[in-house]
Amino acid sequence: MNQTPPISSDLSNLQGRRILVVDDDQDSQELLAFMLEQEGAEIQTASSALEALSLVTQWQPDVLLSDIGMPQMDGYTLIRQIRNLPKEQGGEVPAIALTAYAAEADKETALSSGFQQHIAKPVDPVECIGAIIQLLQKH
């Protein structure tokens, strides 16, 4: 089976980094997971915010990528709950909001809720990987 070459020019940027992908849409979740695995990242996925909360505390990801529009608990509520956790339980995990809600007001809401970045869907792989690398360099 042929592997897709990595998008980033420096594979070590995501090599071994733990990234949690949260999205209730399985196709989006699988695409993001595949793309990030090609960059050398270790991936866990969650289909709901409740599942993600459990993974954040147990698995301690380096970065969280979360959809905003999910049933039961949206991404804004998820990140607020994560930010209420102690640092040692993942409360300070760098996070990127992934959403079809792409207006400036939506970006401001995501950032004020506790996300560090906001990326509009459909996600551009190069933009997403660049944003993750940038976030990891800051934290």
Image (cartoon, rainbow, N blue to C red):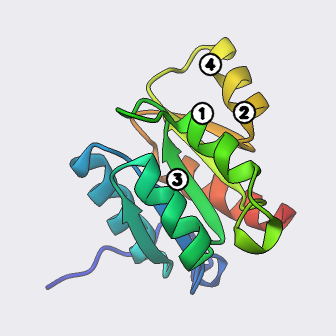
Q: Give the mark toward the camera: 1 or 3.
A: 1
Q: Position of residue 37 (x, y in %)?
A: 41, 75
Q: Which residue is drawn at the image coordinates 69% and 64% (left, top)? A: 133
Q: Is residue 135 left or right of residue 10?
A: right
Q: Secondary structure at mark 3?
A: helix
Mark 1 → mark 4, Cα distance in angstroms: 11 Å
Q: Amino acid at mark 1?
A: Tyr
Which residue is label 1 attached to?
76
Q: Which residue is drawn at the image coordinates 26% and 80% (left, top)? A: 3
In which quarter of the view is residue 137 placed?
bottom right
Disc 2 and disc 1 in contact, CB within 8 angstroms:
yes
Q: Quadrant of the N terminus?
A: bottom left
> Few, some or many C-alpha atoms within 10 Å of disc 3 (few <14, some 14-19, many ≥20)?
few
Q: Amino acid at mark 2?
A: Ser
Q: Of the two numbered discs 3 and 4 on the same chain, state the one appearing first in sequence.
A: 4
Quick one: 87 or 25, which is closer to the camera? Answer: 87
Which residue is label 4 attached to?
106
Q: Of the two numbered discs 1 and 3 on the same chain, state the one appearing first in sequence.
A: 1
Q: Amino acid at mark 3?
A: Val
> Few, some or many C-alpha atoms within 10 Å of disc 4 (few <14, some 14-19, many ≥20)?
some
In which quarter of the view is residue 113 placed?
top right
Which residue is label 2 attached to?
113
Q: Of the two numbered discs 2 and 3 on the same chain, state the one appearing first in sequence.
A: 2
Which residue is label 3 attached to?
126
Q: Is residue 14 left or right of residue 120?
A: right
